[in-house]
Image: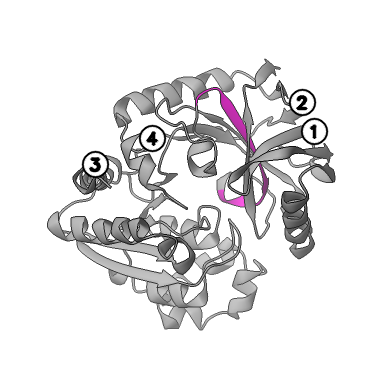
């Protein structure tokens, strides 16, 4: 482990990406699943806190139990730690977890939050992503800058995280300008993907790594253009070659009709996991996102946080897209990367 290199990249994240300033309040949090996977992870977590102190910020740290899936709301203890008991007591927390209480309802109780105690910036590094949660969206509404880094790994600090953010921003915005000329796309791949995605009238978003603006949010590593498709207009199939941290010996073929998964064939472990997630909430089976990777330093095909940023890939997500312009409220958000895609834009 090159601790000097990792600390330098963390400094770049704080200063160049998040734009943190002296005396700002910074919260670094994770879950025990990620933290206890290795001593290296524990070191990375410690370095995020220590570098924040060295740079003159006011860091706090928090560790909680795992949530079980990407896009699930973090547990009550973290909500309370961030927003305070007065705010949390306004709700039945189970309704927050199940998303029976929506973002607008949460925001309506903003007067119960002590704004001065909220973090100015967050580094979120749990195993399971908090990107597509009301927790994250609400913090952005209060002005917090939010770097989501689920299941970040040491190797990323030597590659996909160590980028020139100016160049990345330019490339990503260029790709966005290309896509904005169209309203739909047919995607095929050598593995067998054949799918039509319609995103008419939906806003195209970018993840450039520039999280310096008030209420900014993005993944790190950064580097994608993404959109919430029209929920009932995706048709066809996509083929998943990597999942559960491995290359699938029997790729999973996912068939979609009117925007929703209707059949799966292939890897039994991944298929079984998805069936359980769909049983939790039927909206978890809805196609939620189309994204295109733009980070030329991203290489790792096994970790979806990095894999979805690889150049010459796209990814399709299932589940919640209500946090970035869609209408599907769900309790999960699951990304699947398509390699070497071919596009026919229309």
Q: Are marks 1 and 2 in contact (CB under 8 Å)?
A: yes
In this rendering, the label closer to the viewer, 3 or 4: 4
Q: How many marks?
A: 4
User: Looking at the image, which is closer to me, 54 or 46?
Assistant: 46
Give how far across and how far down residue 343 sits, in percent: 67, 18
In this rendering, the label closer to the viewer, 1 or 2: 2
Tell me which segment is drawn in magenta: 311-323
Q: How is the image coloured?
A: one colour
User: Looking at the image, which is closer to me, 305 or 282?
Assistant: 305
How far is the residue under mark 2 from the one under mark 4? 28 Å
Residue at which label 4 appears: 160
In the image, residue 193 lies in the stretch drawn in magenta = no
Image disc number at residue 192: 2
Residue at which label 1 appears: 237
Q: Quadrant of residue 53?
A: bottom left
Say left or right for 304 vs 10: right
Say left or right for 69 vs 127: right
Give how far across and how far down residue 96 sits, in percent: 60, 71
Specify which label sits upstream in the sequence, 1 or 3: 3
- As helix, strand or loop, the secondary structure at mark 2 comes to loop
How far is the residue under mark 3 from the one under mark 4? 13 Å
Look at the picture and state if 70 lies above or below 182. below
């Amino acid at each position: 482990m090159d601790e000097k290199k990792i600390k330098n990249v963390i400094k770049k994240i704080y200063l160049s990406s998040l734009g943190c300033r002296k005396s700002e309040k910074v919260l670094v949090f994770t879950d025990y699943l990620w933290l206890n996977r290795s001593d290296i992870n524990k070191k990375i977590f410690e370095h995020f806190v220590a570098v924040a102190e060295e740079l003159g910020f006011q860091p706090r740290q928090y560790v909680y139990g795992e949530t079980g899936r990407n896009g699930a709301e973090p547990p009550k203890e973290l909500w309370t730690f961030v927003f305070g008991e007065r705010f949390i007591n306004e709700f039945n927390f189970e309704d927050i977890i199940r998303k029976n209480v929506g973002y607008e309802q949460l925001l309506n109780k903003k007067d119960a939050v002590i704004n001065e105690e909220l973090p100015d910036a967050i580094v979120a590094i749990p195993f399971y992503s908090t990107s597509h949660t009301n927790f994250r969206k609400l913090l952005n509404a209060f002005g917090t800058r939010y770097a989501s880094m689920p299941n970040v790994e040491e190797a990323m600090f030597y590659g996909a995280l160590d980028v020139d953010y100016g160049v990345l921003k330019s490339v990503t915005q260029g790709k966005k300008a290309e896509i904005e000329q169209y309203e739909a796309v047919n995607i095929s791949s050598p593995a067998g993907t054949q799918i039509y995605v319609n995103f008419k009238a939906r806003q195209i978003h970018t993840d450039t790594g520039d999280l310096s603006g008030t209420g900014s949010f993005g993944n790190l590593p950064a580097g994608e253009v993404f959109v919430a498709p029209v929920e009932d207009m995706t048709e066809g199939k996509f083929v998943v070659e990597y999942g559960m941290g491995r290359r699938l010996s029997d790729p999973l073929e996912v068939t979609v009709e009117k925007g929703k998964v209707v059949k799966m064939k292939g890897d039994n472990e991944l298929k079984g996991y998805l069936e359980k997630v769909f049983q939790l909430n039927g909206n978890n089976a809805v196609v939620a996102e189309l994204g295109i990777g733009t980070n030329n330093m991203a290489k790792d095909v096994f970790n979806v946080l990095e894999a979805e940023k690889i150049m010459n890939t796209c990814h399709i997500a299932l589940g919640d897209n209500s946090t970035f312009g869609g209408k599907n409220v769900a309790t999960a958000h699951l990304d699947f990367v398509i390699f070497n895609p071919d596009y026919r834009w229309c």
